Image (cartoon, helix red, strand yellow):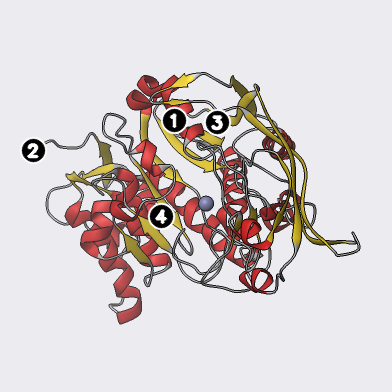
């Protein structure tokens, strides 16, 4: 699957918390993942402390300048860029002067060319977004503000894929589908999640069951949790929120609430070796659905790995977060990191050495006949692995202790198992 091509296809669709844009996007994802089940929960349904809002339908929106001789000059049009209207705007049809118009215009103060992404989901409001430059260029006169929108009782729609494994224990992967035309936040999340889903499906064997969710942010996660909480708490052993994974600038990690889950441990190990310069953020810098998954009483082991983190890049929530901000390489880098997380989760076992004292590696062809520096180092990794295979440490613990990437230890563990030098055990509780 070509992730960038998928982003390009999804980019023009006007998405919101619910409605046609979301359903159209889910239908495209289902083409890539036929197992995707699309669920609909009616507006008005109580979900924890929230209520599912009505669907927003927008037909058209624009601002026209009315000239002296009644000529009309179009200033902005929703059909040119769906960021021009505040998400969830109520309808308006009014002619106003410039000072009144300006009260309904939102701009990005930090960048005079960018159109900001603004929503007003939970408070009735309407408004327009344009670049600061365009706002500055508006001249005195009369303007026609027009938004043709409705709010109807409909559904909140989300997509769910369950990929079964040997165990009913689960890994949760969650991304959001409510943002309109922006690429890093969060079409990149949708595309990398879809490619990762295909990777997981392709694995010849899977220990864990994978639960993959495409939800509107916040309200979607809350809705899903309100309906599946107990099951998730009993089965989810690790999870990630996939967001902002398409640019090439950097890698970032946002910890779970206490930063001490298996997901955190895996993410840190993978990033430490894949992108040692990665930026690490505590839960105080949270911003996406980890806010729901990690909330007190929910307490699912979920953290975030992204590239340039939400709120931390200048293009964030503006028209400049477009397809030129992300790249096939950026998406691929994030996919590689997440694939490694899956591989480590699948192989993260606790091992116990089967011999007393050091085993004789040479007899098994695991030790170089001639002690030479280069060759010797791989034997040293084997010896180090065995030194900590005492039933107390999982693969990641050993990796951290012997300063060798966990993904390399997967191979070593395989060789040692083949030679009956280690066996899998339940973790020693001490
Ligand atoms: Zn966002």
* N-term mark: 3 or 4: 3
Near mark 2 (Cα within 10 A), the count class, few <14, some 14-19 or many ≥20, is few
**Residue drawn 65% across the image and 68% down it:** 135
Residue 118, placed above or below residue 214: below
* N-term mark: 1 or 3: 3
Question: What residue is pinned by disc 4?
Answer: 411
The reply to whether residue 369 is visible in this rendering is: no
Residue 269, placed above or below residue 37: below
**Residue drawn 28% across the image and 64% down it:** 381
Q: Judge from the rendering whether residue 15 lies leftward or rightward of residue 118; answer left or right.
A: right
Disc 2 secondary structure class = loop
Question: What residue is pinned by disc 1?
Answer: 222
How far from the left and from the top, in percent, is residue 55? 64, 30
Are the residues tagged 4 and 2 within 8 Å (C-beta)? no
Question: What residue is pinned by disc 2?
Answer: 430
Residue 241 image-quadrant placement? top left
How far from the left and from the top, in percent, is residue 370? 30, 77
Disc 3 secondary structure class = strand
Q: Disc 1 and disc 3: Cα gap in Å?
A: 22 Å
Residue 58, placed above or below residue 328: above
* N-term mark: 4 or 2: 4
Question: What residue is pinned by disc 3?
Answer: 163
């Amino acid at each position: 699957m070509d992730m960038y091509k998928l982003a390009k296809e999804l980019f023009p669709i006007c998405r919101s918390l619910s409605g046609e844009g979301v359903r159209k996007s889910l239908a495209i994802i289902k083409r890539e993942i036929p197992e995707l089940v699309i669920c609909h929960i009616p507006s008005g349904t109580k979900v924890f402390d929230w209520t599912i809002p009505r669907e927003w339908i927008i037909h058209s929106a624009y601002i026209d300048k009315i000239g002296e001789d009644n000529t009309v000059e179009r200033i902005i049009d929703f059909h040119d860029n769906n960021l021009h209207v505040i998400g969830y705007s109520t309808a308006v049809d009014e002619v106003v002067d410039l000072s009144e118009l300006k009260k309904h215009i939102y701009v990005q103060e930090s960048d005079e060319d960018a159109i900001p992404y603004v929503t007003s989901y939970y408070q009735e409001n309407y408004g327009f977004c344009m670049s600061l430059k365009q706002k500055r260029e508006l001249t005195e006169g009369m303007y026609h503000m027009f938004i043709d929108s409705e709010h109807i009782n409909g559904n909140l729609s989300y997509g769910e894929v369950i990929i079964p494994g040997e165990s009913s224990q689960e890994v949760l992967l969650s991304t959001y589908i409510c943002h309109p035309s922006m690429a890093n936040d969060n079409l990149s999340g949708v595309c990398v999640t879809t490619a990762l889903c295909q990777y997981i499906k392709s694995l010849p064997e899977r220990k864990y069951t994978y639960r993959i969710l495409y939800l509107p942010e916040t309200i979607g996660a809350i809705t899903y949790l309100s309906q599946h909480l107990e099951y998730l708490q009993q089965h989810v052993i690790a999870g990630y929120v996939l967001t902002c994974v398409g640019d090439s600038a950097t890698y970032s990690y946002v910890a779970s609430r206490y930063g001490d889950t298996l997901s955190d441990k895996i993410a840190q190990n993978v990033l430490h070796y894949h992108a040692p310069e990665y930026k690490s953020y505590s839960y105080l810098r949270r911003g996406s659905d980890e806010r729901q998954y990690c909330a007190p009483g929910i307490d699912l082991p979920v953290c975030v790995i992204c590239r340039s983190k939400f709120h931390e890049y200048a293009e964030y929530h503006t028209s400049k977060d477009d397809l030129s901000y992300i790249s096939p390489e950026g998406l691929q880098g994030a996919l590689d990191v997440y694939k490694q997380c899956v591989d480590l989760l699948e192989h993260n076992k606790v091992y116990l050495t089967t011999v007393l004292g050091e085993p004789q590696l040479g007899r098994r062809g695991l030790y170089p006949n001639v002690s030479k520096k280069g060759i010797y180092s791989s034997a040293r990794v084997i010896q180090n692995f065995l030194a900590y295979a005492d039933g107390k440490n999982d693969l990641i613990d050993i990796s951290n202790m012997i300063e060798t990437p966990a993904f390399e230890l997967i191979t070593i563990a395989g060789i040692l198992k083949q030679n009956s030098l280690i066996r899998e055990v339940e973790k020693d509780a001490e």
